[in-house]
Every structure is written in structure tokens, then in C-alpha cells.
Amino acid sequence: MFAWLFSNRADTENGDVEERSSTTVESYADTVGERASGDHAPRPIGDASGSLTKYSEETGLFSTVLEVAYVHITPTVDPLKSFANTFSVYDEHGHVQVTQNLDHGMQIQFNKKDHSMVWILPMGDELDDELVTLGFTFDDPITEDSFKLLIATKLYESSRQESFVKTVKAQDQDWVLGSHAQVDEDAEVEDPMEVVSESEEENDESSHPRTPSRVSKDSSNAKNSHLAIGMGLDRSYVVRGPHIGVFKHGRDGMNHLATFDQVKGSDGTVFSPTKIMLHDRDRKMLMLRPDRLNSVVELDLETQQVVQEYQAEDETTIRDLGPHSRYSQMTGTELITGLNKNSVFAMDPRLNSQNKKVKGFSYAANPHLSCVAATGNAQYAFGSDKGEIRMFSDVGKRAKTLLPGLGHAITAIDTSEDGKWVLATTDRYIMLISAETSDGRTGFDVSLGKSKPVPIKLQLKPQDMVKYRIREVCFRKANFDMGEGKKEQWIVSATGNLLITWNMKNVLRGRINDYTVKVYDEAVVADQFRYGHSDIVVALPDDVKRAHFHPKKSNA
């Protein structure tokens, strides 16, 4: 990447170096046109005029860098890169001031009211190189709209590595392009909240001795990796290599009660679970193991013994597990849901056979399914590596609704209890998707078709990327808060050492940047709301903590 405007010198076309003050005054259009007329120079596929600004951490404001500026999107000439484009900023004389790859790493956000967009510019390729937040204000609203649509299209193609027009049906194109939500900073906001850990709380009980909240370390140097929250019992479980730590939610924090050492399969082989899920009134834990991709290990939590190990079908890989319904782990319901890359299925552990599949649906073409979540009515949302989301009324039938996604792989998915909202996580961003139709039904009941509302795209604002020195976002699974019969109010996720929470009401009003950030000393491994509570259990590599919501303290 090249950022000339932040230095005092620039390379000329013949390789010499000249001071900025000696730049020859010439026409932007003539200069750029001359450069694009070369045999190998690609022409811009989109451009716009406006002004360039830079964000200051000290003042919290944007200041003008170039009163007259032009932005270009140009195909990248590289035989090793498909669907790659370059984003450039020129000054009024046609000199390149900024150039970088057009991708989701820019964390582009649009602001319709200010006719602007904001993004991140890394000042080098090293992790400790400076990050800069830039803004561009458009001169013409019509050009602004077309340029923003072009950005959305090219971001999709960059992620999916396929043509937007060929991949996305005509009726779905507005859904994808509209997802680059315009930030509304003027909308009314809920009372501000902040998230604090138990160690930061000031109360009379803080002097009481605490039970350690760490799983005992072992010689393998294993770290905490997975988290499961009890709904019926006041317990949380954390995987650490082949061990499982048991925690109680104490009044002054997380208390470590016990450790299940050396988890073993039915064949006696020790393994480190790649997925855990509580089941049957929190009395059992279902686990996936890395060395047997087609089996589920059922652990009795009371006896700490493996009850059985089974398959869906003999050679059917199980990529992810889900409950029969959103809160079925609180009941005696035995049915569970599973998937692999091209099929979805239900299993019943009570069957007197090694194969527990009772029904399912398979695709002839591989949709690369990746994850599953269930609603309160036992309807299912499945994410995929292609970024698509399928919504099923039942796993034995064809999906009612197919959402195209925005190009990035769906790594995790959640649903609201009533099925009106789907929350899909990708590495770069989170999508909050309304699944409700105008007549009160959902995309689990009927196809959303052309009536599907555009998704709300949640991401870190560029200013916070600079503030917290984040070179690359990698979101952990986003979750709604939990409670049967309770309307979801919060969303939580994490990237790096940041725990991030969004208020649903603020998000639906367009205040997508009004989130709270809690900074930890270590990277967040997993996080999830406690059932029926507003506090969050947070697993760190070597610790387990609990975070609480509190009214934000006034600076006055």
C-alpha cells in the first residue's frame, strides 16, 4: 500500500523524488486519463469526487486533508488474484495519495446523512505499524450511491471469489447490496451501559475469599478452548485440552468446583473435544472428537463416565451439533440436530443401534454447511462456508428460505426464541437478519422471497480499530441473551481481547456504532450470556470470568 499524503515527499513517475511543494499544477482528469491510457494500465470501473479527511484520536474529530479529492476503484492486475480491486485516492493534480486493496479489512462504513464513508488505512504490513482512519465526503449524492453499491459488489466478490451477478439471483441483489447499512448517529439511544468484570465491582462482598476461577494447568500447555453454559443448573463448563473444568456462578465471580481429567472416548482414547453441548436437563454433555469425525460422545456429568458413543450413519461426518429446540437442554428431550457439508439430520440417542439418525435432508450439490441453531419451535437455521443461510421448518424437509449472505463464510449462527431474528457470525462482521414476514410468519415457515428485509451488518467502527490497535478483526460466535419467554435485548461477541455488546433497540434504530467494549489482558476464547441473566461468562486462555452490565458512569 502507498500513503503519500502522510509524508513530505513523493516519488515522481521517472523515479526521482520531489518535495510536495514543488508539485506541478496540472489537470486531475488529464493526468489520470494519461496514466490509464497505457497498454497495461487498467481503467477505473468507478470513481467519485469529494474531499478527504483524517480522524484524530486526540480531538475525536475528522479534519480535512484534501479539499479536492477523487476516489477510484480499479481492477488489480495480478494473475494470482481473482476478483481483486484497488482502492485509490487522488489529489486534484492527479497524483495518487492513498492506494490499498479493496477488501473487508478496510472496515468501510457509510454515513448517508453526511454523504460520507469511513475506512481504515494500515501504514505498513507489520503488526505494530500505525493505523489511520480516513473519511471521504462525496460531492454528488447520485455518484455517491452508485459508488457505494460498487464497493458492496466488489467486497462480495472479493470474499466469495465468484461473480456477484452470476452467484446472486436478481431478486436477492438488493438484499446483499443493502446490507452495507448507513450509520444513523442522530437516532435516539437507550441509556448508555458499560460492561465490567467482577474484579472491578465495588461492593461489600469483594473482600470475601474467592475460589480460584482457573482450570488447573497441565504439562501439555493446553489452553481453554470451548464454553458451555448450564440452563437448568448453575454451572458452566470449559474445555482445556482433554480436561473439562466445572464452574459455579458465585455471587462474587466464577468459582472453579472441579475438573474432569482425561476425557476419553468409548475406545479408551483420550481426546480434546472440538465441540461440547449440554443435554437432558444439563445432566449430559455431548462432544465431538477430532480423531473420529463421524461420532458423538455422550458423557454423564453426574458420574463423569462416557455413556455411549454413536454415529448418525456409518460414514456420515458430523461437522456441528445443535439442540432440538433453543432451550431443549432444560428438558428431557432426547432429539438433537447435526449436519455435515451437504446434509442436515436429526438423531435420537435412545435408538438401540449404533446409528442414531431418524430423519434428514441431503443436497446433491454441496452447499458446504458449517453450523446450526434452533428456534423455540424446533425450526433451524444453517450457515455455510459460502456465506449462505438456510432456514428449515424441519430437518426432514427442504429449506423454506435461502439467504445469499455477503460472501464471507458463516462460522457460527444463533436465532431468537420466536424465530424472528437470525444472528450470523463471520470473521469480519456479524449479520443481524430479520426473518419476519408482513403477516407475522417467518422465513422458517414460508419463503421470504423478494420481501426479505436487508440484514444489519455489525462491525467495529474504524475509529475503534485505531484506538485499540486492531489490525484484523476475527469475531467469535455472536450470541443473543437467553431466557425462555424473554425477548432478546442484547448481542455479545468478541474479537481479540475485546468483549463487545450491542443493545438490540439501538441497533434497530440505526445506532450500530453504539456498542460497549470491555478490554481484557488476554484474548477472549468464548463468551455467552447466562440463562435468564444479563451477565456474561467469559473464557480466557487461562481464566474464566464473569462480566456485568451497569449504567455508564457520568464523566461530570
Image (cartoon, rainbow, N blue to C red):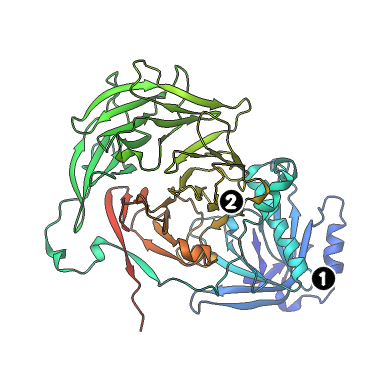
The front one of 347 and 253 is 347
Tell me which numbered mark, 2 or 1, is placed earlier along the sequence.
Answer: 1
Q: Position of residue 6 (x, y in %)?
A: 62, 71
For marks 2 and 1, give the CA distance. 49 Å
For the point 77% across and 75% down, which residue is it? 23
Res 28 label: 1
Disc 1 residue crowd, few under 14, some 14–19, many 20+, Cα 10 Å: some
The three-letter code of the residue at mark 1 reads: Tyr
The residue at which mark 2 appears reads as 437
- Does the image show residue 413? yes
In the displayed structure, 22 sits above or below 351; it is below
Q: Position of residue 507 (x, y in %)?
A: 50, 63
In the displayed structure, 90 sits above or below 406; it is below
Quarter location, residue 456:
bottom right
The front one of 525 and 20 is 525
Q: Position of residue 241 (x, y in %)?
A: 30, 36
